[in-house]
Image (cartoon, helix red, strand yellow):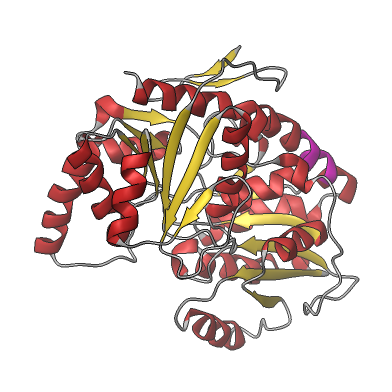
Amino acid sequence: MARSTAAGGPFRVPRTGIVSHAAVSISVLHVVDSLNDHAGAPAIALVGLFKALGDHDVASSVITLDRNPQPSGHAAIHGHDPETVRQCVRAADLVHLHGFDRRLGDGVVSEARRVGKPYIIAPLGTFSPNEHVQAGWLTCLAEWVHYRRVLRRASVVIALNEAEARDLRRRSVDGGVRVLPYGLNFDDYADAPDSRSHWDVGDDERIVLFLGPIHPVEGLVPLVRSIGELGHDFRGWKLVLAGPQPGDWRQKMEAAIGRKHARDRVTFVADPDLRAQRALLSRASVLVSASLCVRCPVSVTQAVAAGVPVVATDHGLPPGLTSHIHLCKPTRADLRDALRPLLTCRQDARLSKGSEARQAWARAVDWPALIQSYVELYESAVHP
């Protein structure tokens, strides 16, 4: 059994990808703000988690803020209301919060503590610095006190990587922090769906793809500026920004792109569903993730699973796997310098890089290889 050690304890990676397990009977209530599969959403990873847990005799139920939650073949899905929260928490052996939306998390944690049920929190960057979330100092202080209490009372706090673990230590929860990545079913990305669409991309153009919300916190401003500085090296390429479009950020970005006379270099795809995301990945030659803060690296893992080479900032990437992608800081110059070698190398070299990354990541974050770590974590929380 290979081990990757990180703050808060190791996560186990079987060399063969074959996991043996004893029969267990645990019921886990998962709490997530949404199960919509929009680009960059943790829900894309969670669907695979629910299936893998079911294969290991761990039953899953879900509470979400979605108004009309879609049914799942691997978990019982519930909308959010106080009575549903009470019933679901009481019926579960363990509660696992994926992210922390106070509209949902506070009530679930309060009920879990009231009835003595253990809970695990995977903040997914919620408690890490984010310059685009601004509040007065009194509000920040009150939230710091509140969140510190919530975190310290958790059985385990899961960090995506060491960077997030450091952020959590600053909240005095070091003793309960464990680094554990999220996985993906790599087999789902072995075959590409039909990529025909109305995307504004010519057949002779190569794609640099971004998958995620169209928002400045995702590093889109330095990314677009870096494209402008690539000059001749970007000839024959197009930057595709694909994801949900909150607020008026797309309009602001389009205006800025127009002022730079770069409309022919950038195109937008509004909120592609999971099938469309896979189709975009099948056309992409490079994926870029330029986030300015900690994020669940769903789009990066999707790209690796699809064999697409990646340029990314280290804000949530799985521990021990960053050497297989092009790592950079979220600045215009760093993004430009990281992209240039991938844009100017031969296509077979890009394919080779993507294949090498896929093999390495599959051994660690393909759900069949990773799931035993989650099962053991749940068992230890229910039976400390």
In this picture, residue 165 sits left or right of residue 74:
left
**Relative vertical location of residue 254 with respect to residue 100 in this rendering, above or below:** below
In this picture, residue 376 sits left or right of residue 335:
left
Number of callouts: 0
In this picture, residue 307 sits left or right of residue 147:
right
**Relative vertical location of residue 203 with respect to residue 263 in this rendering, above or below:** above
Task: Judge by depth and name the residue closer to the eye, 204 or 211.
Answer: 211
Task: Judge by depth and name the residue closer to the eye, 110 or 98.
Answer: 110
- In the rendered image, which quarter contains the C terminus? top left
How far across and how far down the image is residue 76, in percent?
52, 49
- In the rendered image, which quarter contains the N terminus? top right
Task: Judge by depth and name the residue closer to the eye, 143 or 18.
Answer: 18
Q: Residue at x 36, y 47 (%)?
A: 88
Work out whether residue 269 can be spotted: yes
Q: Residue at x 75, y 58 (%)?
A: 278
Work out whether residue 8 can be spotted: no
**Relative vertical location of residue 287 with respect to residue 354 in this rendering, above or below:** below
Q: Is residue 196 one of those drawn in magenta?
A: no
How far across and how far down the image is residue 23, in percent?
56, 18
How far across and how far down the image is residue 220, in percent?
53, 67
How far across and how far down the image is residue 103, in percent?
29, 62
Quarter of the image where one finds residue 367: top right
Q: Residue at x 14, y 67 (%)?
A: 136
**Relative vertical location of residue 89 with respect to residue 224 in this rendering, above or below:** above
Quarter of the image where one finds residue 318: top right
Dominant secondary-structure state across the stretch colored magenta: helix
Q: Residue furthest top?
A: 1
In this picture, residue 1 sits left or right of residue 100:
right
Q: Residue furthest left?
A: 138
* Residue stretch in magenta: 351-356
Q: Residue at x 64, y 18 (%)?
A: 14
